[in-house]
Amino acid sequence: MSTQNTNNNWLETCLAAITKARVSVFGDFCLDAYWIIDPDDTELSVETNLPVRRVREQRYSLGGAGNVIDNLVALGVGTVQAGGLIGDDLFGRQMVEQLEHLNVNCQGLLRCQQDWQTLVYAKPCIGQAEQNRIDFGGFNALAAETIEALAQKLDRMAGQSDVVILNQQIPGGVSTAEMIVKINEIVASHSNCKFIADSRHRAQLYRGCLLKLNSHEAAKLAGQPRPLDERITAELANDLATMLFKRVGRAVFITRGENGLIVADHAGLHEEPGIQIIERTDPVGAGDTVVAAISAVMASGGDCTSAAKLGNIAAAITVRKLQTTGTASPDEILQVGPNPDYIHLPELADDPRQARYLDGTEIELIRRLPHELDIRHAIFDHDGTISTLRQGWEQIMVPMMVRAILGPLYEDADEALYHKVVDTVGIFIDKTTGVQTLVQMQGLIKLVRQFGCVPEDEIMDIHGYKAVYNHELLAMVRKRVEKLRKCELDTSDFLMKNAQLLLERLHAAGVKLYLASGTDQTDVLAEVQAMGYAHLFEDRIFGAVGDVTVEAKKVVLERIIRQHNLKGSQLVTFGDGPVEIRETKKRSGITVGVASDEVRRFGPNPVKRARLIRAGADIIVGDFTQLRQLLVLLGIKGN
C-alpha cells in the first residue's frame, strides 16, 4: 500500500492546475425545489372547501448531475460543460438559468423530447418539517431518436474535454442500458479523454471507465452484496478495490463515508483515512463532491492519490453544511490544509479484541516503531496524563453546556429534548477533549444556535461562556491545591501512577521536557508548581493565552521541531487527548497515548483508548506502572 503524500505543497499545486482543466458532466440533471408553506390554513378553497396551502417562499437548487457541476465550478475548474436531457418546461428553464449563471456551457443539455419532464424533487415544508415529496419525471421514457441525439452531443463534449463524468442516478434517467452501449462506443473512440462512471444502478455496464463507487455499490458490483446497515471493513474494501481494478483495468475509487476512501490503480492500493469532524454533519451530496474533486485533479494531469486526497478534504467540508448539497471552494480547502486531522485505524479503535501487546506487559502496540530511536525531546499533556487535579471537569462542563443550550427552557424542557441535548453535549465533549477551552466554547455557541432555545440577543460570546465554566471548575481545583498546601492531601493523590518517576527518568537521561496544556497559562503554571515537578520542565511550560487562534500544543510542537531541526524519531509526545497525539503524528513524531482512568489513577480507560488510536497513537498505556519496559521500548538509556 502506498504511503501518504507528505509534500505539503501538493494541495496548492492541485488547486492551481485545476483552473486549466476541462470537465464535462453527462447524466441525470435534477432540480431540488423547496416550497416553504405558510402554516396558516384558515382560508378554504371555494372549489374544494379544503384549506389553501400558500407558498411563502420558493427556492431551487441543482441536484444530481447539476450538483456535480456546482461542485466543479466551486473548485475553480476552468471549463465546465453539461450534457443530458431536460424538459421544455418551467423547471428546465430554471435549471438552465442556474447553470448559465455558473458560466457552464449548456449546449449539450437537450430539450428535444416533448414528453420528457425535467427531473424535480419538490419538497413542501411547513416550518422545519418536510411534507410529502412531489416528484416530477418518474414516468420518463427515453426515445430512440433522443439516444442518438444525446450520443452526438456526448461525442462532441468528449472531444473538448480532459475528463467526462458519467452520472447515472435515476433508474429512468438518460443512462439507460441502450444509452450506455452508445456511451461505451464513445469512450472507446476518445483515447485522449478520461471517463469516470459514477453509477448508482448500472456500474456493471460501463466499459473503459474509471469507477467511483461507495463501499456497498462496490460489494454489489463484485458479486458480494451486503445489507446497507452492515459495516464494510477496511480490509474488505481494500480487497474489493483491488478486485475491481483488475477487472476493469482502470482506477477504482471507493468511498467509505466517515472513514475516507480507497483508490486502486496501476501504482497500487492507497487508503485515504477519514477526517475528524467535530461539528454535526449531513452526508447528502458528499459523493458528488468527491467525484467532482477527483475529476478535476485527473483532468489537470494529477495522479489518483492526489485526486483521492482532494476528494476526501472537499467532502469533509461539504458534510458540515447542513440541509443543503454544499460545495467546497479553494479557500475553504486551503483552510483545512494539506495534512488534515485524519482518523487512524477506526476498526482497531472500535474493537479491543484486535489489540496486540508488548510481551509480558499491558502496553498496547499500535504501530511498529522505527529501529533507531534517539529521543531528545518529550512533550507532555498535563491533565489526565500527569495530573488529576482537574479530574471531574467533564461533570462540570456537561451541565454547564446543557444549561447554556436550553436557556429559559432548562426547567421545563420535556424529557426527549433534555436527553437529546445531554447526548449531543456528551458527543461534542468526547470529540473536543484536549483542545483549549475557548475552542470548546466556540462549539457550544454553535450548539446553542442549533437547538434554538435561547434568543439570539441572549447568546454569550466565547469568553462569557468560558467565564461561567471556569468559575465552577477553578473553585474545585483551588480547593484541591489549597489542601496540598496545607498538607491535608499529598501530591500522590493527584498523580497518575509513576508519572513523576517517568519525568525524573527522562530528565536524568538528558531528554528535554515540555508541557503543553489547553488550560490557561497562569493556571497551569500554578498547578504544576503545586504538584512539585515544575523544575523538571524548567521554563518550557505552555498553556492557552486567551486567543482562540493560538493552540498551545501546536505552537510547542512547531517551535521544538523548528528550533532543534528534529527528525520524527527524536520527539515523543505523551497525552490522553487527541490534539497532542494528532499534531505529533502529523510531524512524524512518536506518540504514546495515555488511556488513563483519572478516578483510580491507574489502569486503562477503553473510551480514551479508542479516541487515542483514532488520533494516531503508536503506543497505548493506561498508566506508567510498567515504566522500565516502556523506556526500553522508547530506546531511553539508563532506565
Image (cartoon, helix red, strand yellow):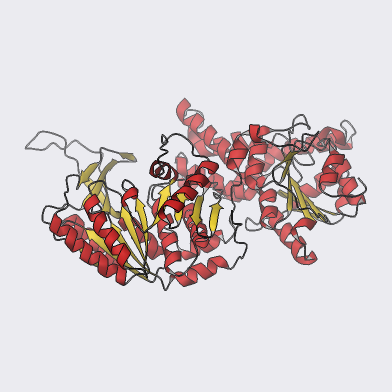
Q: Position of residue 181 (x, y in %)?
A: 25, 56
The foreground one among 320 and 107 is 107
Can residue 319 be seen here?
no
Q: Position of residue 403 (x, y in %)?
A: 55, 35
The foreground one among 170 and 423 is 170
Q: Is residue 602 placed above or below 436 in the rendered structure?
A: above
Counting labels gives 0
Can residue 43 be seen here?
yes
Q: Is residue 576 placed above or below 585 in the rendered structure?
A: above
The foreground one among 523 and 459 is 523
Q: Is residue 458 left or right of residue 285?
A: right
Image quadrant in which you'd find residue 52: top left
The foreground one among 93 and 295 is 295
Quadrant (top left, top right, bottom left, bottom right) of the C terminus: top right
- Residue displayed at 89% across by 34% down: 486
Residue reaching furthest to the left: 47
- Residue displayed at 71% across by 59% down: 555
- Residue displayed at 53% across by 70% down: 13
Q: Position of residue 279 (x, y in %)?
A: 52, 46
Q: Position of residue 46 (x, y in %)?
A: 7, 37
